[in-house]
């Protein structure tokens, strides 16, 4: 049974709008053409989503007890959030799992390109305690641990997360879902627990698509655009780019209710962006992670031509970077 965690507000639960569509498996497809989608503004999309929204799951009453944990990547924005919750920082260059008791979570808030090394060098008996938080496709070995697909932003180290009720929930799968729910509830972040590894993989791939396209479009302008400005000023470019990458997305994921409709996928991207409209992505981080982001789709470029995608990577990241991915 899926669980949705919501922060209480006043005398009742906070109002839920369009994010309900993403709190359950999409039950209905939206029959909108690309041309029609290009004409719709965010407010109209919210109304369309609301008319298709279905809520499935039960509310989770997470404990208010402090979570004892370790944090890898504690000096970054996401890592700093988990560090506030009775956690022990793991210094750079040190392996995890030695400074807390077995069975306590070890939050990994590092770039995805470091995940394999983190897993390899963590204390073997504690690998199932690892909690992976970030933008990247999880390795098969992660199925025995915990994976978090965050749909919130932390704009500065030490700040509270930025989100809204129109955002998709943060998804969590695996062993330490209760710990993630406890922290998320305290921070006012909506959470849905996923029981299926395949569904989690599809949700993660969809988030990686967002991480792949938004930084390219925003940094195609100087100065870089905010997410809200990118959706407004570069809407057709976004639609065309997501359309080009949708077939590779489906090829990687396979059959999944989370990625079976182009229109639903585009709307998901926009709703997540609009939950933190003034955010500007870190270009250097995106380039550091480009193999785990854009490289995933480009690895299928022989099967699925990606002329627009390649042109944007060449323009924003440079020809040498593109050549390394092909």
Image (spheres, rainbow, N blue to C red):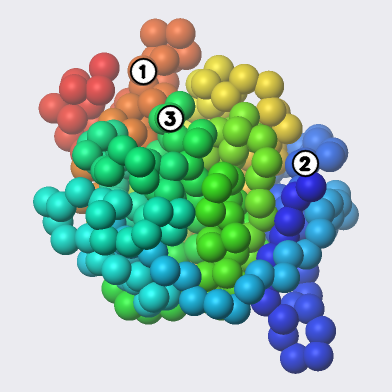
Say above or below: 133 vs 82.
above
Q: Provide the residue designation for mark 1.
A: 299
Residue at image position (75%, 50%) is 2
Q: Are marks 2 and 1 in contact (CB under 8 Å)?
A: no
Check the image and report above or below for 262 versus 20.
above
Give the image location of residue 166, x and y in percent. Answer: 67, 64
Question: Where residue 219 sits: x, y (%)?
Answer: 30, 51
Q: CA distance from mark 2 to mark 1?
A: 28 Å
Give me the residue at 47% from left, 70% from top: 67
- How many angstroms separate mark 3 from mark 2 (CA)? 27 Å
Query: What crowding class fits label 2: few (fewer than 14 Cα within 10 Å), some (14-19), or many (20 or more)?
Result: many
Drawn side of residue 161 relative to residue 223, left or right: right
Relative horizontal placement of residue 156, taking residue 248 as reference (left or right): left
Disc 3 to disc 1, C-alpha distance: 22 Å
Residue at the top extreme of this rendering = 303
The reply, left or right, for residue 287 in relation to residue 211 is left
Which residue appears at 77% of the width and 41% of the height? 26
Element type where label 1 sits in the image: loop
What residue is shown with label 3? 141
Given this view, does label 3 or label 1 mark the residue nearer the observer?
3
Which residue sits at x=19%, y=21%?
323
Pointer 1 local density, CA inside 10 Å: few below 14, some 14–19, many at least 20: some
The residue lying toward the viewer, choosing from 235 and 119, is 119
Number of on-image labels:
3
Residue at which label 2 appears: 26
Question: Is there any visible trace of residue 2 in the rendered image?
Answer: yes
Badge 3 marks a residue whose secondary structure is helix
* Residue 207 coordinates in the image, percent (x, y): 51, 43
Of the image marks 3 and 2, the number of the one nearer the N terminus:
2
Q: Is residue 127 above or below residue 247?
A: below
């Amino acid at each position: 049974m899926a669980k949705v965690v919501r922060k209480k507000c006043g005398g009742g639960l906070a109002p839920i709008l369009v994010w309900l569509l993403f709190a359950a498996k999409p039950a209905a497809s939206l029959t909108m053409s690309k041309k029609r989608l290009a004409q719709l503004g965010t407010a109209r999309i919210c109304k369309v989503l609301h008319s298709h929204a279905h809520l499935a799951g039960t509310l989770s009453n997470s404990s208010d007890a402090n979570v004892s944990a370790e944090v890898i990547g504690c000096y970054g924005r996401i890592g700093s959030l988990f560090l506030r919750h009775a956690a022990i920082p793991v210094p750079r260059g040190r392996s995890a799992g030695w400074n807390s008791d077995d069975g306590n979570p070890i939050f990994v808030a590092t770039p995805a390109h470091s995940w394999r090394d983190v897993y390899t060098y963590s204390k073997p008996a504690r690998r199932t305690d690892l909690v992976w938080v970030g933008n990247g496709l999880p390795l098969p070995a992660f199925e025995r641990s915990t994976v978090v697909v965050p749909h919130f932003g932390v704009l500065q180290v030490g700040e509270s997360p930025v989100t809204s009720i129109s955002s998709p929930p943060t998804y969590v799968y695996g062993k330490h879902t209760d710990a993630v729910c406890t922290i998320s509830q305290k921070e006012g972040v909506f959470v849905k627990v996923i029981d299926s590894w395949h569904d989690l993989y599809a949700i993660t791939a969809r988030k990686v698509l967002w991480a792949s396209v938004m930084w390219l479009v925003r940094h195609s302008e100087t100065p870089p655009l905010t997410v809200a400005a990118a959706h407004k000023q570069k809407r057709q470019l976004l639609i065309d780019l997501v359309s080009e990458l949708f077939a590779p997305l489906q090829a990687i994921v396979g059959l999944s209710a989370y990625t079976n409709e182009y229109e639903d996928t585009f709307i998901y991207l926009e709703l997540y962006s609009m939950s933190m409209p003034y955010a500007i992505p870190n270009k250097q981080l995106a380039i550091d992670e480009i193999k785990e982001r854009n490289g995933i789709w480009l690895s299928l470029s022989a099967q699925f031509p990606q002329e627009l995608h390649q042109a944007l990577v060449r323009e924003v990241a440079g020809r040498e970077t593109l050549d390394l991915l092909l």
